[in-house]
Image (cartoon, helix red, strand yellow):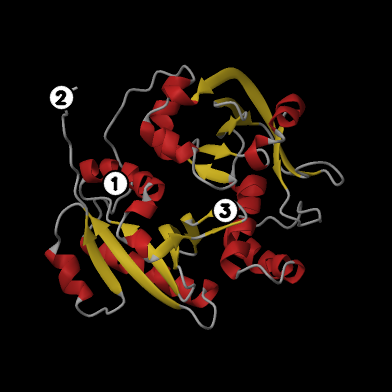
């Protein structure tokens, strides 16, 4: 199944024109070695080997930052498959569209030396023509952003014929309409984090341009990873997304366990928050036995103002 990604070509798209002309995308992250035989099928094994290498060269960096960097390096080098579609900003409010055409290559001494070949299509998408949800997803901080949930809109923008459908292939989703709404909520929450109740105490984790949204763990990507302003607490934020109550509680606990074991420093504690549109007695009942997870509801307010 084809996936869709937004990939930055250097900070502020500084290498975009060279990548377009040379038919490639790439990253570096200071890992100066050929990865041809170092790219396992799963990112976990890659991170296990390369996070220590990354931190040895950058002792001032955090384990979370190292995980973000190595995760992005693996995604570009291996996780993105041949035939996947890329949207790459050109630095002028437009996105060039390309299709990944080959496997990883190492080009030492050149810019973005961990590379993938790309066939660039004769298609450019204006950011202004995107929905707000797609703008938020493509505008997220970080080298790589998986924008597959917006595949139908992207296909329309590049000339496809897909019709909008309200479908989730996730077997744990009980309510597809809530799933569709909360897919957009995640981007909205990230974009407006500073204005929320959570933003008073926590910042979404960010380091070297990589952000803690859809942070990969060994049981899947957690929605948002945040850190308290005093750096003493890490926060896992999960949106219910129409899933069964037991599923979202269990998943949140698994993510928190991963963060505690793999990312937290010795002086950091790990907490969790589940966010849902409606009150959920089953979640509240489960959380009475868990002291470090809180439950939040959100409200949607729509107003018409006479001009």
Q: Which residue is mark 3?
A: 210
Viewed as shown, does residue 23 lie left or right of 278? right
Q: CA distance from mark 1 to mark 3?
A: 23 Å
User: Residue 147: in sight, yes or no?
Assistant: no
x and y, in percent, of residue 232 in the image? 47, 76
How many numbered marks does the figure carry? 3
Q: Which residue is mark 1?
A: 182
For marks 2 and 1, the one nearer the N-term is 1
Residue nearer the viewer, 165 or 51:
51
Q: Which residue is mark 2?
A: 306
Give the residue displayed 71% in from the left and 72% down from the top. Answer: 59
Residue nearer the viewer, 92 or 47:
92
- Per the image, label 3 sits on a secondary structure element best described as strand
Viewed as shown, does residue 247 lie left or right of 124? left
Give the residue displayed 57% in from the left and 18% down from the top. Answer: 123
Give the residue furthest to the right. Answer: 109
Nearer the camera: disc 3 or disc 2: 2
Instruction: Work out whether 268 lies above or below 295.
Output: below
For marks 3 and 2, the one nearer the N-term is 3
Q: CA distance from mark 2 to mark 1?
A: 29 Å
Give the residue displayed 16% in from the left and 29% down from the top. Answer: 304
Nearer the camera: disc 1 or disc 3: 3
10 Å crowding of disc 2: few (<14), some (14-19), many (20+): few
Res. 62 mark: none
Give the residue displayed 49% in from the left and 72% down from the top. Answer: 231
């Amino acid at each position: 199944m084809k996936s869709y990604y937004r990939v930055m070509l250097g900070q502020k798209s500084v290498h975009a024109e060279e990548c377009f002309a040379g038919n490639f995308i790439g990253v570096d992250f200071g890992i100066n070695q050929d990865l041809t035989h170092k790219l396992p099928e799963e990112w976990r094994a890659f991170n296990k080997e390369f996070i220590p290498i990354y931190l040895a060269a950058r002792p001032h960096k955090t384990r979370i930052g190292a995980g973000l960097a190595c995760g992005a390096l693996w995604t570009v080098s291996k996780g993105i498959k041949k035939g996947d579609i890329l949207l790459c900003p050109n630095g002028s409010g437009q996105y060039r569209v390309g299709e990944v055409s080959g496997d990883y290559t190492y080009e030492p001494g050149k810019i973005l030396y961990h590379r993938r070949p790309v066939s660039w299509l004769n298609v450019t998408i204006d950011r202004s023509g995107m929905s707000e949800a797609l703008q938020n997803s493509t505008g997220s901080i970080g080298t790589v952003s998986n924008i597959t949930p917006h595949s139908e809109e992207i296909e329309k923008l590049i000339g496809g014929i897909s019709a909008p459908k309200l479908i989730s292939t996730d077997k744990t989703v009980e309510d597809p309409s809530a799933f569709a709404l909360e897919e957009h909520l995640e981007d909205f929450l990230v974009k407006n984090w500073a204005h929320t109740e959570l933003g008073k105490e926590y910042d979404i984790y960010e380091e070297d341009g990589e952000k803690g949204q859809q942070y990969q763990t060994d049981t899947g990507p957690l929605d948002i990873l945040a850190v308290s302003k005093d750096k003493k607490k890490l926060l896992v934020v999960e949106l219910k997304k129409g899933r069964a109550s037991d599923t979202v509680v269990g998943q949140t606990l698994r993510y928190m366990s991963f963060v505690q074991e793999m990312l937290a420093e010795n002086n950091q504690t790990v907490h969790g928050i589940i966010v849902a549109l409606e009150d959920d007695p089953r979640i509240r009942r489960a959380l009475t036995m868990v002291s470090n997870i809180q439950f939040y509801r959100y409200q949607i307010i729509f107003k018409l103002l006479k001009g």
